Image (cartoon, rainbow, N blue to C red):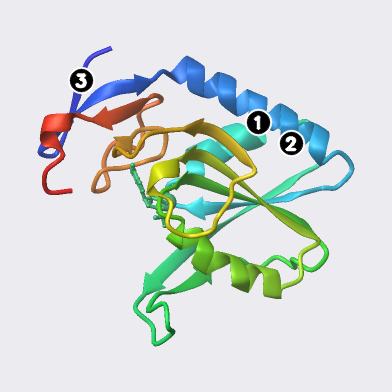
Amino acid sequence: MADIRIHDKIFSPFISAESIQERVRDLAAQINSDYKDKNPLLIGILNGSFIFAADLFRSLTIEAEISFVKLASYKGTSSSGHVVTAIGLEEELHGRHIIIVEDIIDTGKTLHSFLPGLHQRQPASVKIAAFLTKPTALQYEVKADYVAFEIENKFVVGYGLDYDGQGRNYPELYQLKEEFLQGL
Ligand code: XMP
Ligand code: MG
């Protein structure tokens, strides 16, 4: 596989489509076994998770539902200076088993801000499925329960993840080339 160019940057092949599909099927198998007869509600965080969520959901053989939210983040007056509002989550969550589906947990800030509001709606349980985590970048206490790949702290694109809007449609994952890291 060859390097790709997106806007001004060059990315190298990182994880193949075959490896991704294999790991996603592994996670689905775990969820099938953990959530049998629980009818979990998967909640995909837009935009980045839509491809992972679709593949994961398609591999589930148990009774399950899926919905999506868009998180709008802005500077608020809270002590953290960071407020997240969820747009589009209209389902009744009370008593439901929730699986949040994220493309990547980087610092953990996004999910750390989103989780308290979710718990207020009294779900029966909340777990997190992340396609990627960057353990060395984590700054907030967020623990993913299902992880396809733990990666080093480098910028990646493909399989739903973008660089400035582009690159989401690649079926494999690409990593930013070292010499182009400046300015990110
Ligand atoms: P936090 O820091 O809140 O970040 O956990 C999560 C969000 O940051 C974006 N992100 C990336 N997007 N390649 C991307 O395309 C990356 O390597 C990357 N790292 C973080 C992403 O939107 C994610 O939901
Ligand atoms: Mg995202």
Circle 1 residue: 27
Circles 2 and 1, Cβ within 8 Å, touching? The answer is yes
Q: Is ligand 2 closer than 8 angstroms to the Cβ of mark 2?
A: no
Q: Residue at x 55, y 55 (%)?
A: 142
Disc 1 to disc 3, C-alpha distance = 29 Å
Disc 3 to disc 2, C-alpha distance = 34 Å
The amino acid marked with disc number 3 is Asp
The amino acid marked with disc number 2 is Ile
Mark 2, secondary structure of its residue: helix
Q: What is the quadrant of residue 5 in the picture? A: top left
Q: Nearer the viewer, residue 146 or 135?
A: 135
Circle 2 residue: 31
Circle nearer the N terminus (1, 3): 3
Q: What is the quadrant of residue 91 in the picture? A: bottom right
Give left or right: position of 46 versus 61: left
Question: In this orientation, does residue 62 appear?
Answer: no
Circle 3 residue: 3
**How many numbered discs, if any?**
3
